[in-house]
Image (cartoon, grey):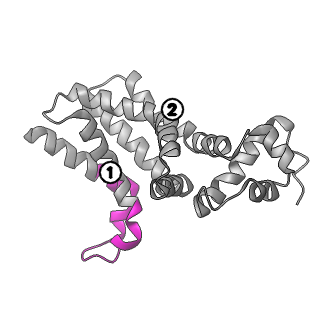
Amino acid sequence: MKLNQTIEKSDTRKYILQKAIPMLAANGYSGVSMRDISKAVGVSSAALYHHFTDKENLYLEVMRHAFSDKAVAMTAILDMKGSPLERLEHFINSFVILIDADPDFRALVQREMLDGDEPRLKLVAEEVFAAPFQAITSVLEELDTDCDPHFLAVSIIGIVMFHFEAAPILRFLPGAQPMHNDPQNIIKHVMKFLTKAFSAD
């Protein structure tokens, strides 16, 4: 398979990242070699290493590429006007849409946590997730609840993620309905839950 000649050289790097995302999502870091990627993309291994110094570098760039445009939307809450609760709702809305619309990214995150490779986890946490996490933590600090903002941020992210990660089994539980998988219903539920919790606090 030859690399499409209509793709400009400046776009080759992006093309490689786009092709690598589903491969890494399906097979994990250890299940995909640089040779596999070069074959799928249609370039030589030497050409691949011209764009990425090693597999770890390519992997981190894949994570950045998969998350970059979504991260901008979520971190933008720091510059928004409105109450902390309104900005929190904006964050949750952006986060739910991200997780729902990009199963490959969701799979990448799940695989990384399952692999448990500490240096990679640290790298991804610092290079990819730190800014959005800081954004939601800052908003939660403004809410001035009795909860630790870090704990609360982790819990909110966990609530959202679980709806999607456990979806294959949740549909078999008593009372499960298609509406429970609808992203807009998930957003409404999470915000209703949090609003009541903050009011009680």
The mark closer to the camera, 2 or 1, is 1
Describe residue 128's horizontal placement relative to residue 201 as left or right.
right
Q: Which mark is residue 72?
A: 2
Q: Does the stretch in magenta take in 166?
A: yes
**Quadrant of the snapshot with the C terminus:** top left
Tell me, yes or no, whether the two marked residues, 2 and 1, touch with CB atoms within 8 Å. no
Spatial CA span between label 2 and label 1:
20 Å
Describe residue 43's horizontal placement relative to residue 142 as left or right.
right
Q: Residues within 10 Å of mark 1 (few under 14, many from 20)?
A: few
In the rendered image, the residue lying farthest to the left is 200
Place of residue 198 in the rendered image (x, y in percent of width and height, measured from the top left): 15, 39
- Residue type (three-letter) at the residue carrying disc 1: Gly
Q: Report the residue at 86% width, 37% height from top.
A: 9
Place of residue 37 in the rendered image (x, y in percent of width and height, measured from the top left): 75, 55
**Quadrant of the snapshot with the N terminus:** bottom right
Does dot 2 land on a helix, a strand or a loop?
A: helix
**Figure label count:** 2
Q: Which residues are magenta?
A: 165-188
